[in-house]
Image: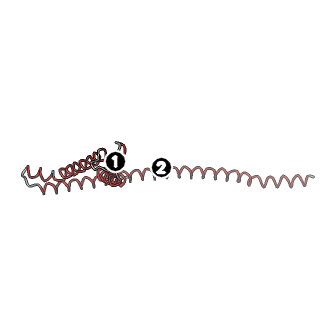
Amino acid sequence: MIALLSALLGFISSATPDIFRLFRDARDRDHELALLKLQLEHDKARIAEGAAERQARLEAIALATEQAEQVSLNARLKEQLTGIHWVDALAGSVRPVLTYSFFLLYATVKAAQFNLLLHPVLPWAVGSTMAQALVLVWSEEDIAIFSAIMAFWFGSRVMRRTQRG
């Protein structure tokens, strides 16, 4: 019996350092895992800061490019000026005058179409209600023209914003 107890005591005493080593290793692994998690969070924060810095640099480059383009356009416009005020004003008004003229022509034609739909002049034509006339006057072509105009005036702003961001 003493031999059995001494054998058991010898086994326990020899296994005790290994048991403590297992607990210590588990604590060390938990500690290393916690350190790795902290390192990962720190790296993610640095990457986010770097992305924010890159985004700020890209925005600064886009603004500088836009400013350089504006300066270039202004310089080109100054080169084209004749120095005679009314000639320069007339040259600068060509596009707006043409645009307003064609819009006035377009609106006049649409008003005439609307009026003819409401009050037909041909004996076999039947008059339309106001709602029917509006639907008939606003065709797919008008929608395409309207879309093109809106895209021209406001699409470039959206495109610049999407290129920046």
Which sits earlier in the primary sequence, circle 2 or circle 1? 2
State the residue at coordinates (47%, 49%): 45
Between residue 112 and residue 149, name the one nearer to us: 112
Q: Distance between the residues labelled 2 and 1?
A: 73 Å
- State the count of labels: 2
Where residue 111 appears, as percent x and y from the top left, is 26, 46
Between residue 125 and residue 94, name the one nearer to us: 125
Amino acid residing under circle 1: Val
Amino acid residing under circle 2: Ala
On residue 36, the disc is none
Where residue 164 appears, as percent x and y from the top left, is 35, 53
Left or right of residue 7, residue 114 in this image:
left
Q: In the rendered view, how is the structure colored?
A: secondary structure
Q: Quadrant of residue 134?
A: top left
Where residue 50 appears, as percent x and y from the top left, is 42, 53
Of all residues shown, which one is farthest toward the top?
Answer: 130
Where residue 85 appears, as percent x and y from the top left, is 8, 49
Q: Name the residue under label 2.
A: 45
Between residue 154 and residue 53, name the one nearer to us: 154
Q: Name the residue under label 1.
A: 126
Of all residues shown, which one is farthest toward the right?
Answer: 1
Between residue 47 and residue 16, name the one nearer to us: 47
- Indicate which label's residue lies in the foreground, 2 or 1: 1
Left or right of residue 67, residue 57 in this image:
right
Question: Dots 2 and 1: beta carbons under 8 Å?
Answer: no
* Label 2: few (<14), some (14–19) or many (≥20) C-alpha neighbours in 10 Å: few
